[in-house]
Image (spheres, grey):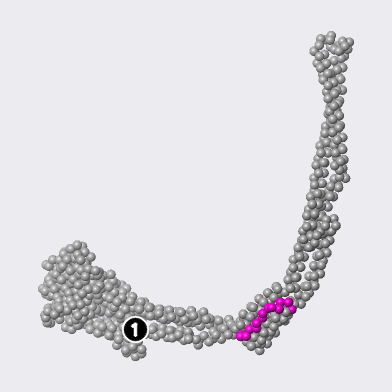
Amino acid sequence: MGYEQRLEEQVRASGRRTEERLALWETIVSSFQSSGAEGVQDELAKRMSHLRRRFDALVVKLEDML
Amino acid sequence: MFHLTRLTINGFRGFTDERVFTFDEPVVLLVGENHRGKSSALNAVEWCLFGDDCVGKKSGIRERLDWEVANRQAADGAVAVEAQFSGPDGSYSVRRELDGSKRRSGGTLMVVLPDGTRLQGEAAAGRLPALFRTSFRDFMTTVYQHQETVRAILTNEARERNDAIDRLLGLSEYRELLRGIRLADVEKGQRSMEGAFEGLRIRAEQSIRTFENLIREEKAKAMAQGLRPEEITEQAALSMAGEIAEAIRSLARDLEVPELQVASPQRYEEIETFRQWAKDQLDSLWAQAPDVVRQEALAKKQQELGKLSGQYEATREREAQARQELETFIRQNGDATALAQRLRERKGKVDELDTRIREMDKRAGLVREAVEYLKTAAPDAASRCPLCGSQAPQLLAHLESEWEQTLSQEIEELARQRETHAFQIDGIQSLRTQLEKLEKGVRDAASEVAGWLGQVGRALGREIVGRVDDPAALMRARLAEIDADLERIGKAIEQKRQRISGSGGIYDQLAKLRTIDEIIRYEQKRRFVERIWESPEVAQLNELRGEAAQLVEDVQVIRSSLATVSREEAQDKIQAAGASLSEYFRRMADHPAISGLMIEVTEDVRSGLNSYSFKTTDGADPTPILSQGDFNCLALSIFLGLARAAGEAQPFGFLMLDDPAQSLGSATKRRLVGVLEDVASWRKVIIATPDDELRKLLMANVTKSKAVYDFVDWTEQGGPKVVRV
């Protein structure tokens, strides 16, 4: 059994947010297979960065309101 | 099982021209010095079967990051590797090609089955894993031990050794995945967001405190202004604004500016604009008021006349002074007529003296001639008068005495008198010049005074007649009138000014209105900030925080799962390799203090990676006493142990070892050969080595028949030169 399948079993065993975590895992695997560890880093950083951009825009808006 | 029977390499890495290797003996040796293509020959098998999986980052082998597949010197840059296998149903062929445009990745695949079926491209790529049931990862752990993997374990750094053992066990992917997750550090991103949110919260609190302070200050001001709490409302503010508007209207009427339009604010939002408008209107109103305009005009005239009067008086004074100086001079020296008279007298005297001097000079001339004649005449003639010839014995002496004592003295006296009179003439001339200057000064001053008359007349608005009107008195009279007017107007204006800036005046009312307005606005802003936490923006912010926290949790679960799975797989493999591993290590290393070796794997709490520790069969930690050669034996033991454990389940019936004798001494090499003799009984063994001693030991002590390919040379143009021995 490959590492992908092993980890899927592990994630399912965690019980919560299975679908979301499997989807994230799938994205991580895809990034890894195309660009290795750096691909994983970039993908996760991109996700966090996307949240952060929207977050920062709201913070700026709220600070202007203050 | 599939046994490698033939390998054809063309254009792959160091191979320029086509080379063929047949694996028709139980043991095949690839021997020769370094950098002649031995490892590349083994790599070719790997690449043929697994393509891009064994190249670059995906391979998990750090040395392969910049791996080039295509030979740089090959004619068209194309690569072709074909591996033939004998399998359960006959002969299988796998051929992988890379065209000249690609140096590292890509390529086409062709598989030929025993029945002659040819599969290409996607079909071949799909069939291959099903056929051989081996991933690249498994191939690395149970079929092909890379020299890079052995080299990696020969390190004193625990972290690097753990990495090397993970690679040996085929767990590099877990390691790399965990590394990628660690590098992303999503927790840091979340912490940063929480920090920003906290900053926002603190800013809001500070803002509320600031507004509360401002409200407190303004309310204190309101109390000092006499405002009651019930007056600090929007309605009260509008009412006050209406009163102010009415006061301005009334003032405008009294100031005789009735056309001023005054509008009271109808809504609270108009208060701020009204305040500014009221102030501007008051300024404008005041500037337009007739009394104020008149007052300014009078003040201007007062200033003008004051200055003019001062200048006129100064000019008059200069004239008086000039006259005084002239009179004083005349008293002391006489006027022009007197001076002229005196000058004539002196000149007459001088003329008279000049005449007498001329006469004296004539007499003196005669006497000098007579004296000269007598001095030069004969003694007899010297005592006679040269004119009448009578006897005059003392004539020369008498003439000399006459010249020296009488004539010369008289001439000197006359000259002295003349000089005195001439000196007096110069003095009188000088006085006449002074007199002329003083008279001119008086005329100039009088002219200047006359010149002011025009200016004074224009300033007073009337004609000034010289010698009839007194400009100074006229100006003084006018200034007195202006003073009286200014006093009168000032009193009238002051009364109106009090309505604006006096106690209870319009400015006072405006100040109260400003205070009310400020309090109400600050209270509005404070309420706004307090309610900001109920705004949609904050709700979205909290959503995003939730998403970030969820992402972090999900990543942590995946990371934890990866660590768990990696560790469990390591444990499974070590357990499977188990007894074989320990036995191989014992036989190869033959360490006097280590009778057997066990490997334990735990999780590094910080990184989640596998951490390997070694124990002897009696529970001691042998790491401090393991040499480089011992670690090589360990790497070989793990590989051979895993291969042994795979048994018949392993699809491939051969093992490939690349430079297995790194860091081994002669005795250890002999023991290694002993182990390989056993291995050769259950697997075909392909060994690449530059080590001549190992080669000789293998030739002498491995009882299975052997094929030897000697890599005698390598050139850039031709690639490896290989001879089958």
Q: Is residue B215 left or right of residue B616?
A: right
Q: Which residues are magenta?
A: B254-268
Q: Is residue B706 visible?
A: yes
Identify which residue is drawn at 32% across, 89% down: A12
Look at label 1 and name its amino acid.
Answer: Leu
Identify which residue is drawn at 70% across, 73% down: B287
**Of the pair B283 and A24, the residue shown nearer to us:** B283
Label 1: chain letter: A
In which quadrant is the N terminus of chain B drawn?
A: bottom left
In which quadrant is the C terminus of chain B drawn?
A: bottom left
Identify which residue is drawn at 82% across, 66% down: B480
Number of marks present in the image shown: 1
Identify which residue is drawn at 79% across, 62% down: B460
> Which SS does the magenta portion mostly show?
loop
* Element assignment for label 1: helix
Q: Is residue B654 visible?
A: no
Quarter location, residue B435 = top right
Q: Is residue B360 left or right of residue B617?
A: right
Q: Position of residue B604 (x, y in %)?
A: 34, 80
Q: Residues within 10 Å of mark 1 (few under 14, many from 20)?
A: some
**Of the pair B31 and A17, the residue shown nearer to us:** A17
Quarter location, residue B553 = bottom left
Q: Position of residue B386 (x, y in %)?
A: 85, 12
Q: Is residue B501 left or right of residue B620?
A: right
Q: Is residue B265 magenta?
A: yes
